[in-house]
Amino acid sequence: MTILEIIEKKKNKKILTKEEINFWIEGMLKGEIADYQVSSLLMAIVLNGMEKEEIFYLTDAMINSGDKIDLSAIDGTKVDKHSTGGVGDKVTLILAPLLASFGLKVAKMSGRGLGHTGGTVDKLESIPGYRVELSREEFVNQVNKVGVSVISQSGNLVPADKKLYALRDVTGTVDSIPLIASSIMSKKIASGADLIFIDVKVGNGALMKTIDSARELAHTMIEIGNQYKKKTICILTNMEEPLGFAIGNSLEVKESMNALKGMGPEDVMELIIKTAGLIVSSVEEIELEEAEQQCFKKFNTGAAYEKFEEMVKAQGGDLEKLEISNRIFSVRSAKAGYITHIDALGLGEIARKIGAGRLQKEDKIHYQVGLLLNHKVGDFIEVNEELLKVYLDDIDVKVNDILDCFTIEDEPIEKAPLIYEIIK
Ligand code: URA
């Protein structure tokens, strides 16, 4: 068997065997297959797709490429969630403690942000003292004791994905359902949870541009989950505007803290209640409506917020020291009208440029900078009314670049729903 034969086979739309896929993944990690050959095979997969069995073999080979996290020392149902990435997406910060307040176990490994999307780990690191790196033992002990821990992804979790993702990023081979599904699910399965919840973002600022493609991705991931006897639930949600009002690390932590007290932005609360409701109703085998009602109670009684405080404290963080920049300026609307579109990608880029994110892996983040919107799509705004506040450190921003992210028109539009579909 040679890699050239495998590339030729996929080029000719043939189905790859388990042995061929293992040969590719193992050879790639040993450095025996050149990057240009892997890239060529990836492009053949993007163009010709993969059958279900090939996707299962690929996911399996990726899982077996590195560490598998054993969560068997944690009692109770272990829950994990993943989002395909968005601007202002702070769901994990709110959802993880909320689920723990129900007695579910959340042993969550998260990533850092790259480009215009922020990462949960960076957001948590904006809390002074918060340790995102715990030993395996500390992690398991904390989840058993507190019910929740969010840490940074282990260095050797699915190394095949790290290699493939880096190549895909620079060879135009990211947007392939078999490759995305195997990339996400291999990491989730290797992380060891019993129930996997995935938020598939749809829209201009997201990887999936249409509901049809998002639906196909969701079905593929559910089938992979079923193969491993993992209950997998997907939600398709709108990513046409940022989630909530805050973009930037400590600003998002502050917004999440309000949400944990039941006082977050409407869209954030809607998504959290639906997500937690679906997970709790599935685990506890109760009606969705009842589970959603119980979520409100967890906010109102302070139980969800207390879990968050407990988690932060257990990981060394000090919420009293959370800082937001005091170099603030207002961006005001140049005209009156209805906001018909907010460019999430554009605002994410601006936040990244002022220091909230990084362009290169080694870039330093300025945790206290970011954007705080005053308005969402559908709102009416007067001329000279404040559109948003910018929190700056030492990097400036052009006001016109921000204004260009907002479309303001005379007529209102019908706003698309936040949650398109639930697939399980
Ligand atoms: N997120 C992942 O983890 N992998 C992909 O391929 C796309 C999004």
Image (cartoon, rainbow, N blue to C red):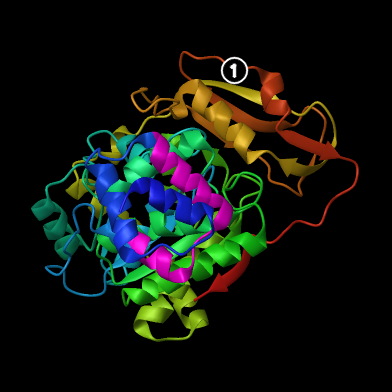
Q: Main secondary structure of the magenta part?
A: helix
**Picture residue at 59% right of the left edge, 61% below the top:** 214
The residue lying toward the viewer, choosing from 86 and 102, is 86
Coordinates of residue 292 in the picture (x, y in percent): 49, 74
The residue lying toward the viewer, choosing from 21 and 193, is 21
- Residue under numbered circle 1: 397
Q: Is residue 129 above or below residue 424?
A: above
Q: Is residue 43 magenta?
A: yes
Coordinates of residue 46 in the picture (x, y in percent): 54, 51
State how many labels appear: 1
Q: Quadrant of residue 231?
A: bottom left
**Picture residue at 35% right of the left edge, 61% below the top:** 59
Estimate how packed mark 1 is, as few (under 14), some (14 to 19) or many (20 or more) residues with alpha carbons within 10 Å: some
**Picture residue at 57% right of the left edge, 66% below the top:** 216
Indicate if the residue with disc 1 has its beta carbon within 8 Å of ligand 1. no
The residue lying toward the viewer, choosing from 412 and 215, is 215
Q: Is residue 21 above or below residue 37?
A: below
**Magenta-colored span:** 36-59
Left-right relation of 341 to 307: right
Q: Is residue 287 magenta?
A: no
Q: Residue furthest left?
A: 137
